[in-house]
Structure formats: structure tokens, C-alpha cells
């Protein structure tokens, strides 16, 4: 698939972009994977807050979902191709699978299914991943942004989730939402202007 805008190379003396970090991690600089985790953790947590239905929240914990995503991403990272797929897009595909798996088990088991730990069989979560996720969870700015996002129209909330957080290309998002690409791009520009009024982390929303 084509590069997402956020994968455009920065100036040579600037910080590494997401793709640059992913390439460096693939080249053996494994500490760069930790930087990727830190950079996208706010987006993943916000995504989980918006995607976990109110009826599920007693059983599916948002931080457990995020931690499980990073564990699976680390295990699958050897198969990740930084030249073919944007890292954000790849990680959110994993996130969708994690939440889908948890929700299916919850539906199958009902209230007796238990918490996310049982639903996802969380094991061997690194302490640094747990600490980072808990720190991000306490960020009141993110919590207020999620509250604001819940008050959006259904169409704009889906647009925020698919384009803003998951980083879907406009053509793919337009097909999923059943609208034209041009119409979606204009709606995203309007929504992006509203998002920029919030003091959110730099990488919360895809460029």
C-alpha cells in the first residue's frame, strides 16, 4: 500500500518519523521499538476508549487491550515490512484483532467470561509497557479528548477512528464509510480543524 502522510521523511536533522523509527528497529536498533510504543500509545488508548462499548467496560479494560496489542506487535515485528506498510496502520490492524477476539469471547461466555486478563490470556507483559500505559491512562488531556469525541456525530466519530487514529488511507476509509473520497477528504479537513483546537499529543492523530 502507499505511504501514509505521516511517513513522509523529515528534514535530515529532525527527529525520526514513524517509518524511520520502524526501519531503525528492523535494522537492529531495538530500543527504537520502545519509542514507537511511546509515540502511538496515546492513539491506541484513545482508540480503545472509543471502540469499547459501555456494556463491555466491566469486562474489557482499555489498558489491558493496549498492552496486549504491544505484546503481539513485538512478537510479530520480525514479519513487519517497514517499506510496504505504515507502522501505525499495521499496529491498528493488530488492535482490531485483539478487540474482536475479546468481544467474541465475551459474547460467547456472557457475564461469566470475566475480565480482559481472562479474555485475552495476558501473559509476560513487560513492566515498561505496563508503566507507560498506566501513565498515558492518567493523562487528563486524553480523557477530555475522548469525552469530546464521544459527543461527535456518528459519522465524524467513525472518521476520527478510521482516518485520525487508525491512519487508514482516504480511499480505504471512504469505501468503509460508504462515501466518496473527495467528500471524505473535505469532511476530514473540517474535523481536523476542530481536533487542532484540543491540546493533544503530537502523534495522537495521523497527519
Image: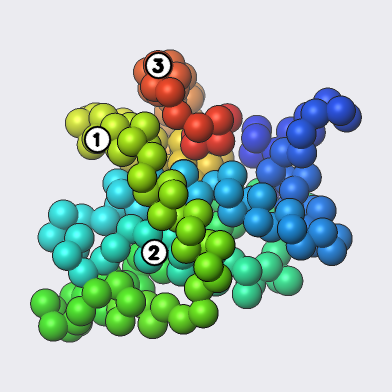
Residues under labels 3 and 2: Cα distance? Answer: 28 Å
Frontmost residue, 58 versus 51: 58
Residue that badge 3 annotates? 197
The answer to whether 184 appears left or right of 39 in the picture is left
Frontmost residue, 22 versus 34: 34
Residue 116: where, in percent of width, then height?
Answer: 30, 72
Residues under labels 1 and 3: Cα distance? Answer: 14 Å
| Residue 76 in view (yes/no) | yes
Residue at position x 64%, y 39% in the image: 4
Q: What secondary structure is found at the residue carrying circle 3?
A: loop
The answer to whether 174 appears left or right of 102 in the picture is right
Q: What secondary structure is found at the residue carrying circle 1?
A: helix
Frontmost residue, 54 versus 14: 14
Q: Is residue 27 above or below residue 42?
A: below
Q: Is residue 1 above or below residue 68?
A: above
Q: Residues within 10 Å of mark 3 (few under 14, many from 20)?
A: few
Q: Disc 2, disc 1: CB below 8 Å?
A: no
Q: Is residue 190 above or below residue 99?
A: above
Residue at position x 55%, y 30% in the image: 202
Residue at position x 73%, y 54% in the image: 32
Residue 106: where, in percent of width, then height?
Answer: 21, 75
Residue 50: where, in percent of width, then height?
Answer: 30, 46
Question: Which label sits on residue 147?
Answer: 1
Residue that badge 2 annotates? 65
Q: Residues within 10 Å of mark 2 (few under 14, many from 20)?
A: many
Q: Disc 3, disc 2: CB below 8 Å?
A: no
Q: What secondary structure is found at the residue carrying circle 2?
A: helix
Amino acid at each position: 500500500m502507499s505511504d501514509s502522510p505521516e511517513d513522509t521523511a523529515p528534514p535530515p536533522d529532525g527527529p525520526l518519523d514513524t517509518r524511520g523509527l520502524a526501519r531503525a528497529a528492523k535494522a537492529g536498533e531495538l530500543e527504537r521499538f520502545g519509542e514507537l510504543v511511546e509515540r502511538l500509545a496515546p492513539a491506541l488508548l484513545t482508540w480503545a476508549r472509543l471502540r469499547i462499548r459501555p456494556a463491555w467496560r466491566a469486562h474489557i479494560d482499555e489498558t489491558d487491550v493496549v498492552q496486549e496489542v504491544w505484546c503481539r506487535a513485538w512478537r510479530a515485528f520480525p514479519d513487519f515490512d517497514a517499506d510496504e506498510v505504515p507502522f501505525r496502520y499495521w499496529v491498528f490492524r493488530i488492535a482490531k484483532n485483539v478487540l474482536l477476539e475479546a468481544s467474541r469471547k465475551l459474547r460467547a461466555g456472557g457475564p461469566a467470561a470475566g475480565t480482559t486478563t481472562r479474555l485475552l490470556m495476558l501473559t509476560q507483559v513487560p513492566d515498561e509497557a505496563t508503566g507507560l500505559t498506566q501513565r498515558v491512562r492518567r493523562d487528563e488531556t486524553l480523557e477530555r479528548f475522548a469525552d469530546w469525541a464521544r459527543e461527535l456525530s456518528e459519522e465524524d466519530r467513525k472518521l476520527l477512528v478510521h482516518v485520525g487514529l487508525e491512519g487508514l488511507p482516504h480511499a480505504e476509509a471512504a469505501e468503509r464509510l460508504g462515501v466518496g473520497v473527495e467528500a471524505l477528504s473535505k469532511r476530514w479537513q473540517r474535523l481536523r480543524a476542530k481536533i487542532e483546537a484540543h491540546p493533544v499529543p503530537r502523534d495522537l492523530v495521523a497527519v
